[in-house]
Each structure stands twice: as C-alpha cells, then as structure tokens.
Image (tube, rainbow, N blue to C red):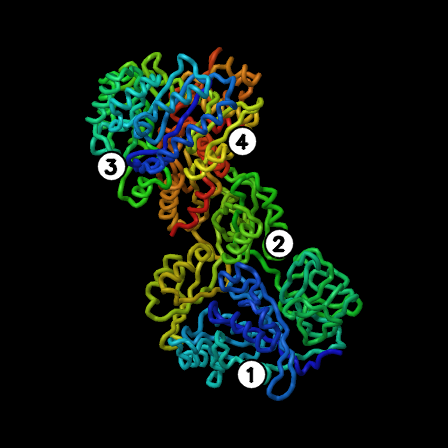
C-alpha cells in the first residue's frame, strides 16, 4: 500500500484551535497551484514503478480553491503517478464551501470519498472555536454531497471543546448517525501552543472541560457509536463495516506515502532505506525552490531498523485490530511478540495488551493509556 | 630583602551584606593602583559567580596593596576579605586573627546590623584596632549622624571623626587609607623565630594543588623548606610562596608580619585546614597558634541525582567540590525512594544552599535534596547515646529513653515596630525569650534560645518578610536540650517514602503533616489508580489526602503524516519518567521532594 497526500493551505478563516499550515487569504492561490503542479511533475519520474492506492486532498479547506482547480489537481496526479483504478480518493471540505459545483468537479475527477468538517452540531460551540458554518450548513452539505454522488462520507467531530458538555457531544453524534454517514472521526481537542485558543485558555478567558469530563464525554460517545453499529477501528475513528479509511489505515500500517504541498510529510522506502522528510512550511520558499526546479524538502531522515520497528508498533497499536504478526515478521524478519517480549509480557499482565496467534492489540484499557503502553516499547 | 615590618598594615573590612564592603575594597585597590583601571571588574574580590550574584563573600581572600601616605612613606597594606555569613563565623575569626585592624563599614542609610555586631565582637576578641567608616553618604536617605550614634552607643567605639565616604563615587576614600596607616599598628613578630604561619583560608588550584593562605606570625618561609601542619602533623615540601597582587605572584620568601600563600603540592584542602599553624619541620615552633577548631558540619541533607543514572557524575562532582571546601562532609546513602545518593553535612543552611547551587551550576547536575536535618542526640533505654543526622535512621520509639536537639542563642536586631511580629515568629519556632534591650531609640536587640532545627528551615525568610527586610539575625551554638520530638512519616498508597521523613516537635507534627500531604496531593501526577497520601507518627495516621486516578492518557491526534510530533511527545514523556522516582507502586516526580521543602 502507498498513498498520496496533497495539502491545500487556504481557509476562509482559521479555526481558533488550528495549528496546521493554512492561510486565511487567497492572494497566493494561483502561484501555489502552479508550484503544486510542478512539484507533482518533479516527482513523476522519481515515483515511477510505485502503485498508489489512495489519494487524500486535505487542508486547510481544499474546496475554497477556484473552480476547476481540484479537478485539475486530480487529473495531473493521475498523469504523473500510477494510481490504482480502485483507489480511494478523498477530499476534505467544510460545510460552508461544499458547493454543488465543487462536489460535481470532484466526482468528475474520480474522487469517491468526502470528508466533512462538522466538529460540533452545537452552534454556540462552533462559534467559540471559530468555525464559520452552522449546524444547518452541515445538513445542507451532506445532502449536496449525496446528490453529487458520494456515498462514502466522513464527518470530523471533536470532543473536549470549550463549552461542550457530554450531552452536546452526544447530540452531535446523534445528528451524524441519524444521517447514516458511514464514517466518523472523533478527535479530542489538543490545545496547541501558539493558537488563539491556547492564548485564551492561558488568560482564563476560555475554560476547557476537565480531563474527567472529557473522559466521560468520550466514554458516553463511543458507547453510543457502538450501539449504532459503528466499529471503533482506530483510537479516534469509527466506521460501518467496509467504510474504513484506507488512506489513514496506510499511515497506521506504517506504509509509504508521498506528501505534496506546503509542510506535507512523506515516508518512503528509498534505495532500500526507510526515509522520512517533509516540505518547507514557508510558502515563499516552497514556491521559489520549485520555481528553480528543486524539491522544497527539509529534514530528510534515514530511519534505522529499530526505529522503524517502533514506529510500526506505535502506529499499528492505534488500530483496534492491532498489528498482524505475520506482516511485521515479513517486514522485519522477526515476530513482534518475541522481539518486544518484556514489554509485551508486562503490558499483558497489566491488562493493556492482548496477543493472539495472528495479532497483538491494545485492550480498551490499553487504548486509554496508549502513551504509557508505547513508552514501555520505547524503553525496551 | 624583606619589606620593613613597621610599614606593613594587615586589616580586614567588616560590613553587613550590601553595606558596601566589596565596593570599598575595589575602590582601595583602584586608589593604590593595585589594579589597572582597564582590568577593573566590579567587585574583584568576590570571584565566584554565586558570590557576585548574592552579593556576599563565601571564601576569604586577600590582596596586597602599596600606598604612599601623606607622611611620605610607602606602606604595604594587606587586605584580608572575610566571609560575610553566620555559617562561616569560625573562618571569619581566623581571618581576623591574621590582622591587626579592621575597617568597620556602616551604611549611613541603615545603621548597624546583627551580623556586623557579631563580627565586631570577634574583632575585639582578637584585639583588633577598629576604624569605623560611614558609607553611602551620597544617598539622599543617608543619616551619618545616626550611624555614628549607633556605633558609639551600641559598640562603644568613638566614631565622631569616622571618615564619611561614598565607596561608590570614591568620595573621601583616601581618608580611609590614611586612617589605616595611622591607626592600625604594624605587625609584630620575629623573622628569625621558628615559623608560625596562621592559615586563614585555603583554596584548591588545578595546577598548584591546595594552597594555604597564611599570615606569617613568626619566622620566615621559603621555597624548599619542609613544613609541618601542627594540628594534622603532616609534612610537605614548599614549592612556592607568593603574595596576592591580587593574582598569585611568587616571591622569594614570606616573613613575619606578611600575608601570602604557601604552595606545597598538597592534594586536598582537607590537609590545609583553616586555623592550623604551619611551622618548619626542622625548627618547629613549640606550640601552635591558639584558636584552632575542627569545623563540624551542623546541617545535613540527602543529595541525589534527579536522574538516577547521574550517580557517578554526582560523586565526581562532590569529590571535586570538597577539594576546595573541606568543611563539607559526605558519605554514600541509599534511599528506597531516591535510590543512590549522598548524606552531606554543611556548616549551615547557606553553606548547604551554596554547595547545592555550585553542584548544579558548575557541574551541570540536576539534584534532588531532602529536608535539612540537624544532629539529634538520642539516648537509648540502655543509656547508650546515638547521634542521628538522618530521620530514617532514628531507632524505634520503643527503644528510646529520650531525645535531645541542639539549641542556639539567636540575636535579632530590629527597628522597634517589628518587635511584635518577630516575637510571634520566634514563638512559632519554639523560641524561649531571654532578653530584649533597646540599643538605642530605633534599634532593639532580641535574644532567644531556639532549637537549631527551627532555624534551618525558613526562619530567615520569615524574619525578612515580617520586618520588611530590616531585621538582621545572628546565632551562636548552644547545648543540647531534651525535647519532645517525633518522626513524621509519609506513606504513598500505603508505602513509606523514606525521603520525606522528618523529625519534628510533637506540637508541630499535625500542622506539618497536613501541609506536606496537601502539597504532595498537588505535585504527584494522577496515575492509573487512586493514591492515598498519609502522614503518620509511628503507626498513627494524622493526615490524609488522595490523588484521584486518571482515566486516560491524552490521545494525540495523528497529525496527517507527521509522526515526528507524536514521537517527540513520547520521548518527552519517557524523559519525564526518568525523573520519576518509584515509591512502591507510585511514581513521584523528583521535583515533588523539593517542593515539600518550601512549605511555610
């Protein structure tokens, strides 16, 4: 498996919690688009012989691009790279920008999955966190998405938001499940330094729910989703059977991916070596270097085998199905249960990890304390 | 040829912290061109960073100056700088014993402080000629007349003609030099007599080894001489003698009346003890100079590396530290909570703080220290006596007949308006009122008998805050007294945490137990299970707090393909875990042990 990620760093307005690279003005949209196309072309020959199974256009808000641009990007991607006929092609959209026009364009270009940023169905919460859409916009967007021809639709929601209660969170989930969307991502808010929300919270202008309240929310919400037939297949992701996000599953399998666009990250096996790098996060550098025919790559790291193993564990244990022992052994020539025997035994005794013939995976308790579990693997 | 003895003046400067001792010393060096203008660095004598930052002198040092006085003669002035804190009273007394006179600097805006008074008495004990000097007269708030009255009334020294100076601007400083020359007697001593050199300080140098800073009282010493330290009996061959210029300057000989250093390839300052007398092995003096004392540590604490892996580094650092400070004692100790570390003894609380700070700063170590303890005298049922400096080693109460703790006589000087709140403080600290005297209208001297263990905690801070910084304080050690002492223990999830145990007076155990338990509840992070925190005396629980269980780790989002952030987060948590200590089932951050020390 291998995936392509394309980053669109523009938004109408930046959400108050967001620390991704994204700009609230479109002055540079044209030059960025040109640079992105030239980046794809630069990679075309380098990626020859690699079959890609997924494409994910994320942001920012990809659907704020000028008409025709999304289609042009996907068309160019298909020209430059060997993309499987049955590839999962996802695009992110925010409710207010999921217009019929953009959605139609995406379908025409071969996109088959749409990810909508709802975050909350509570109008007051949406306003506090700086979203510009209303719950009603979301309903309209879902119906537009379906009319355009998408059936594989995800809703991103968040918990642990300022002003949010367990009830408000459950209302959000109720809305999404009533709409029978087949996939839900529910991330708990992480307050990132440097964001406006971080400032507001440190100044005491905004209060976050306590860790216990967040835990309550999460337990209630996840139980609710389970009752509705959604499977928690990863720490924060829920899907109806067969609707798991293949692009993200590839990340969690520690598979190869090529990141295109500002500050996007890549992991590739290059000349036999597991390699990670990312693009510059400065728009001017990105445009300039591509204009000079260079790749705007930073921090290229060769990952040693031991490190690659740990990454595989760290990412694989996010999935409730855990790690397939045979896959791990095929990749590293050693059974993970044997290789990590002390950590595995200790975690099994603590009731955090289970091991079967095929797999090792974290229990519910283990998922709750995933960091602690991973540190055990790390220390070994 | 030796410098004519009658033209030598050996003196020191006595002053309270901030009253301008170092500034005056700098100014004297400048006036006598001992230091070229361009080399002048503020407060040359205080050579350690910590000394400069805290504005206090920790080690003694000396400098030789030449001054051509108004009488036309050129005098050799040896300034011996003394430590300025109660922890170092003995060192001060030896430095003063090396002088014939002292300049008493009094801040015209502040008047006399307790510490100054203590040092003046030491100087008088050593028969020193005292020259009062009123400093900081350039300040608007200066009240030189008041300062003069205080000197006359409190110390009983005539001060009407005391030079009124500003060390900062240099105003009238020359007058101080003239007074040193005219008032302080020249040293006595016979250069031909058997050698008697008083060690007033010692210092370790990487190249020269341990240097003895000496005042030659009798005789002469030259390179090549075989010398004997009269108290230790050890003998060495002198490789170099020299003076302070202010940097080390080798000379051919040091002779009676002079001040300088002796180098003899000595490996540690433990051999060159302050107060010892150096003599010649082949022509020894009959008796050593009087006044020698073995400096005994008074305050003890456990010092551990914050990261257990740094034990060896801590050991090396302590080895190096005591090369320069023989008054620190240390021996390995093990704590169930903190692992491998050292039990260290210090002359006092400031001495302890300075040592900790030097270890952290000069050796780049991250330390955990346990609560300071004094030495308790424990009389067992069978009448035998044990000296206990670590609460963990206290025998079971069943075996103890009685316990005794060291007392001090504390002298506090304060403006009268703070007397009430200071008396309250002393009461809280179990002080027994001895005396109160009005030294004059604006100054009261309080005398209390107090347990040392109450002083080593936060007495000084309390005094400062209750007197808005105006009160000063000094103490001398007294006898051991019987006391109702108990060992206060803390249990985390049922397991005793030895590093938190302290010995306290029974009346204070409840309040202290509660305060520490509350603090622990704040600083111990929530873990997967609930953690009861209990304070106990013997088997009896006197306070309880609970750290509630945490329900989940923070689940980091998967930042697109950026897994380095998640890895960094885990690395950080892993590093954090290294700084955690395991007490039974409970992980306790190293900082937690320190934070309970800062409870008022």
Q: Tell me if residue B15 comes above or below residue B532 in the rendering.
A: below
Q: Chain of mark 4?
A: A
Between A279 and B170, the one lying in front of the other is A279
Image coordinates of residue A353 in percent, x first then y, are 44, 20
Q: Which residue is mark 3?
A: A128
Which residue is at a point 45% across and 18% down the rendered structure image?
A52
The span from disc 2 to disc 3 (Cα, nearest Å) is 60 Å
Instruction: Say which mark, if any, is on residue A301.
Output: 4
Q: Chain of mark 3?
A: A
Label 4: how many residues lie within 10 Å, few (<14), some (14-19) or many (20+)?
A: few
Instruction: Say which mark, if any, is on residue B179.
Output: 1
Q: Which residue is mark 2?
A: B322
Q: Which circle, 2 or 4, is nearer the viewer?
A: 4
Which residue is at a point 42% across and 58% down the rendered structure image?
B459
The span from disc 1 to disc 3 (Cα, nearest Å) is 76 Å
Res B428 visible: yes
Q: Which circle, 4 or 1, is nearer the viewer?
A: 4
The span from disc 2 to disc 4 (Cα, nearest Å) is 46 Å
Label 1: how many residues lie within 10 Å, few (<14), some (14-19) or many (20+)?
A: some
């Amino acid at each position: 498996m291998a995936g392509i990620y394309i980053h669109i760093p523009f938004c109408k307005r930046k959400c108050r919690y967001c620390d991704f690279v994204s700009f609230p003005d479109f002055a540079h949209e044209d030059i960025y688009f040109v640079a992105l196309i030239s980046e794809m072309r630069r990679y075309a020959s380098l990626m020859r012989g690699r079959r890609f199974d997924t494409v994910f256009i994320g942001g920012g808000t990809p659907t704020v691009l000028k008409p025709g641009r999304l289609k042009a990007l996907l068309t160019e991607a298909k020209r430059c790279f060997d993309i499987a006929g049955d590839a999962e092609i996802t695009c992110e959209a925010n409710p207010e920008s999921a217009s019929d026009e953009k959605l139609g364009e995406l379908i025409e270009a071969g996109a088959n999955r749409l990810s909508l940023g709802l975050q909350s169905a509570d109008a007051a919460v949406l306003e506090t966190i700086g979203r510009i859409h209303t719950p009603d916009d979301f309903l309209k967007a879902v119906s537009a998405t379906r009319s355009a021809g998408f059936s594989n639709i995800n809703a991103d929601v968040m918990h642990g938001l300022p002003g949010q209660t367990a009830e408000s969170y459950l209302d959000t989930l109720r809305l999404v499940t009533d709409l029978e969307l087949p996939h839900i991502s529910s991330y708990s808010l992480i307050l990132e330094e440097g964001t406006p929300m971080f400032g507001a919270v440190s100044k005491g202008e905004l209060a976050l729910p306590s860790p216990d309240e967040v835990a309550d929310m999460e337990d209630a919400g996840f139980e609710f989703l389970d009752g509705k037939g959604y499977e928690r297949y990863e720490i924060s992701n829920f899907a109806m059977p067969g609707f798991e996000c293949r692009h993200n599953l590839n990340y969690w399998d520690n598979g190869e991916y090529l990141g295109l666009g500002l500050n996007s990250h890549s992991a590739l096996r290059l000349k036999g070596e597991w390699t990670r790098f990312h693009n510059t996060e400065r728009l001017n550098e990105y445009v300039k270097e591509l204009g000079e025919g260079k790749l705007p790559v930073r921090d290229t790291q060769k990952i040693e085998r031991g490190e690659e193993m740990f990454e595989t564990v760290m990412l694989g244990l996010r999935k409730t199905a855990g790690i397939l022992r045979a896959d791990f052994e095929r990749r590293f020539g050693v059974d993970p249960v044997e290789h990590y025997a002390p950590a595995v035994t200790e975690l099994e005794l603590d009731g955090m990890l289970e091991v079967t013939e095929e797999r090792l995976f974290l229990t519910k308790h283990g998922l709750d304390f995933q960091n602690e579990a991973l540190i055990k693997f790390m220390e070994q | 040829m030796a410098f004519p003895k009658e033209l030598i003046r050996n003196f020191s400067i006595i002053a309270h912290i901030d009253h301008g001792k170092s500034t005056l010393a700098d100014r004297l060096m400048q006036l006598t061109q001992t230091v070229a203008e361009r080399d002048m660095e503020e407060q040359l004598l205080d050579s350690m960073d910590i000394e400069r930052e805290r504005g206090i002198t920790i080690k003694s040092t000396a400098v030789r100056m030449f001054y051509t006085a108004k009488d036309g003669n050129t005098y050799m002035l040896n300034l011996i700088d003394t430590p300025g804190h109660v922890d170092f009273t003995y060192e001060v007394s030896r430095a003063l014993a090396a002088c014939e006179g002292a300049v008493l600097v009094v801040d015209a805006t502040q008047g006399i402080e307790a510490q100054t008074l203590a040092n003046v008495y030491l100087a008088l004990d050593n028969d020193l000629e005292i020259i009062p000097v009123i400093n900081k007269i350039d300040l608007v708030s200066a009240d030189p007349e008041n300062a003069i009255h205080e000197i006359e009334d409190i110390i009983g020294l005539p001060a009407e003609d005391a030079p009124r100076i500003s060390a900062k601007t240099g105003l009238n400083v020359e007058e101080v030099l003239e007074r040193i020359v005219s008032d302080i007697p020249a040293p006595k001593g016979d250069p031909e007599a058997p050698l008697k050199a008083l060690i007033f300080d010692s210092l370790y140098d990487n190249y020269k080894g341990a240097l003895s800073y000496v005042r030659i009282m009798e005789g002469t010493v030259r390179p090549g001489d075989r010398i004997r330290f009269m108290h230790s009996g050890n003998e060495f061959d002198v490789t170099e003698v020299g003076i302070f210029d202010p940097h080390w300057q080798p000379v051919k000989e040091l002779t009676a009346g002079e001040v300088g250093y002796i180098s003899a390839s000595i490996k540690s300052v433990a051999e060159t003890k302050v107060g010892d007398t150096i003599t010649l092995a082949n022509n020894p003096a009959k008796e050593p100079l009087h006044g020698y004392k073995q400096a005994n540590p008074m305050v003890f604490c456990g010092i551990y590396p914050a990261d257990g892996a740094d034990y060896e580094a801590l050991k090396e650092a302590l080895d190096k530290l005591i090369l320069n400070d023989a008054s620190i004692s240390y021996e390995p100790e093990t704590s169930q909570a903190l692992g491998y570390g050292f039990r260290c003894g210090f002359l006092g609380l400031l001495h302890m703080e300075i040592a900790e700070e030097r270890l952290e700063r000069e050796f780049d170590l991250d330390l955990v220290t346990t609560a300071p303890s004094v030495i308790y005298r424990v009389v067992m049922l069978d009448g035998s006596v044990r000296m206990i400096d670590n609460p963990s080693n206290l025998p079971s109460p069943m075996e103890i007949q009685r316990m005794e703790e060291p007392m001090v006589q504390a002298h506090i000087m304060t403006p009268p308006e703070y007397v009430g709140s200071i008396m309250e403080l002393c009461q809280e600290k179990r002080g027994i009122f001895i005396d109160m005297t009005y030294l004059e209208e604006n100054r009261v001297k309080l005398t209390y008998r107090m347990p040392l263990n109450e002083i080593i905690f936060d007495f000084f801070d309390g005094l400062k805050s209750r007197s808005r910084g105006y009160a000063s304080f000094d103490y001398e050690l007294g006898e051991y007294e019987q006391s109702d002492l108990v060992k206060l223990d803390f249990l985390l999830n049922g397991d005793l945490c030895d590093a938190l145990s302290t010995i306290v007076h029974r009346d204070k155990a409840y309040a202290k137990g509660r305060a520490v338990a509350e603090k622990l509840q704040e600083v111990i992070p929530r873990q997967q299970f609930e953690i009861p925190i209990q304070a106990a005396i013997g088997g009896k629980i006197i306070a309880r707090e609970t750290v509630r269980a945490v329900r989940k780790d923070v689940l980091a989002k998967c930042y697109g393909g950026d897994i380095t952030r998640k890895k960094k987060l885990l690395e950080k948590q892993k590093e954090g875990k290294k700084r955690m200590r395991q007490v039974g089932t409970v992980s306790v951050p190293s900082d937690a042990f320190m934070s309970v020390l800062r409870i008022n």
